[in-house]
Amino acid sequence: TDKEVLESFRRENEKIQASYILVTPEQFEKDVSLNDEEAQNYYAQNKNEFIVPPTMRVEYIGLDFPEPEPEKEETAPEAAKPATAVDQTLTVTEEMKKPAREKANAIFQDLLVNPDMQTAGGKHNVEVKSSGFFSMEQPDLALGWSYELLIKLFQMDKNAVNDPFETPQGMLIVKITEKKDSYVPEYKDIAEKVAEALRKDKAKAIAQKKTEEYLKLVQDAFARTELKDFAQTVKSLGLEVQQTPIFGRGEYLPLVGISKEFQDAAFALTEQNALSGVVATETGYSVVHLDSRVPADEKQFEEKKQSLSEKLLNERRTQTFNDFLSDLRLKAKIASNLPQKKQ
C-alpha cells in the first residue's frame, strides 16, 4: 500500500545523531584471574569453540608466465621519444602464455600415469614445492592462492592431482599429499588457547556488568533533574562520551563499525524515550542516547515511490516463495536412505 511504501521511504532516508558510552572487554582482561580447573571446565562446556577445521598439505609445481613487455606504439619518427615508466603499458599476450600452458599440460599427463610429483618435476626440470597444513579458514597466505582454487582443492581426495589451474601469475599443478578431518584437540594441547578464550569470556562478563552499573547511574542522575544532559552526566561520572556523526541505517560508524544491534537500538529511541538499555555489539557494550533526528525529505518521495514500491514487492515475493519452499520441505518429511558416514 502507499502507506507501507511511505513508511519504508521514511525508514530508509531518516538520519539521526547519537551519543554513547562504549565499554570494551579488552580493558578488563588484565584484571581477570584464572586457574586450571576453571579452564578445564570451560573447555568441557565449550568444545565446539575449539574445533580444528579440515586441513591439508600439498605438493605443487608453479610455472610462471613471462614478465610483461611494454606495448609497442606506432608513432612517426619525429614524434619518437624515450619510453618512460609512465607511458608504458605492460602486457602478457596469449602467445607468451602458451609455453607455460603446454608445459603444465605435459606434466599433468605424466602425473596421470605416475602421480609422483618429484619424478615429474625431475623429468621436466621444474621445482616441486611443499606446503604446511592449512585450512579454508586459515589458508597459507604465502601461497597466495585464490578462494576458487582452495574450494576445488578441499573437494579433492588424498593423493589426487588437480588439472592445471591458471592464475594471473602462471600455471599451477597441485597434489594433495595429506588430509586431516576436523577434530577437537585434547585440552593439554591447547591449554593456553583455552585460557585466553576464558579470559576474554570473563572480561566480557565484567564489561557487561559495568555497563549495567553505568546505565543505572545515568538513569538515577536523569531522575533528579528536568534537564537530561547525557554528555555532561556521563562526564561527571568520570566516563568518556562518544558522539556519532549524523548517519542513516547501514552506514559505517567510527569505533562501532556497522553494528545492526547498535543502529536498531539508536533508531528505536524517541524524544520522550531518548536513552537505551545496554546494547551488546561486536566491540563491547553501549548505552545510547538520541541527540537529534533528521526526518526524511518527503519532497523526494514521489520521484522514488515507484522504484521503492517495486523493490518492496520483490522482497515480499522472495520472502513468500522462501516461506512456501520451507513449508513444502516440512510437509514432505523426506527420509534419506543413503549410507551415513561414520563419525
Image (cartoon, rainbow, N blue to C red):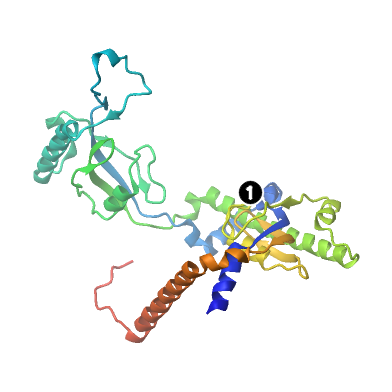
- Answer whether residue 80 is visible to the viewer in this image: no
181 and 238: which one is in front? 238
Q: Residue at x 66, y 53 (%)?
A: 25
Please, what is the three-letter code of the amino acid marked with disc 1?
Answer: Pro
Is 233 drawn above or below residue 130 in the view shown? below
Q: Position of residue 126 (x, y in %)?
A: 19, 30
Where residue 219 sits in the image (x, y, percent)?
82, 65
Q: Which residue is mark 1?
A: 254
| Left or right of 229 in this view: 313 | left
Residue 152 shows in the view = yes
Check the picture and name the quadrant holding the C terminus. bottom left
Which of 66/208 is in front? 66
Q: Is residue 99 above or below residue 264?
A: above
| Direction bottom: furthest residue | 331
Image coordinates of residue 7 in percent, x first then y, are 59, 73
Left or right of 44 in this view: 246? right
12 sits to left or right of 172? right
Image: 216 above or below 124 = below
Could you say where residue 183 lies in the image, as x and y percent from the top left?
40, 57
Q: Secondary structure at mark 1?
A: loop
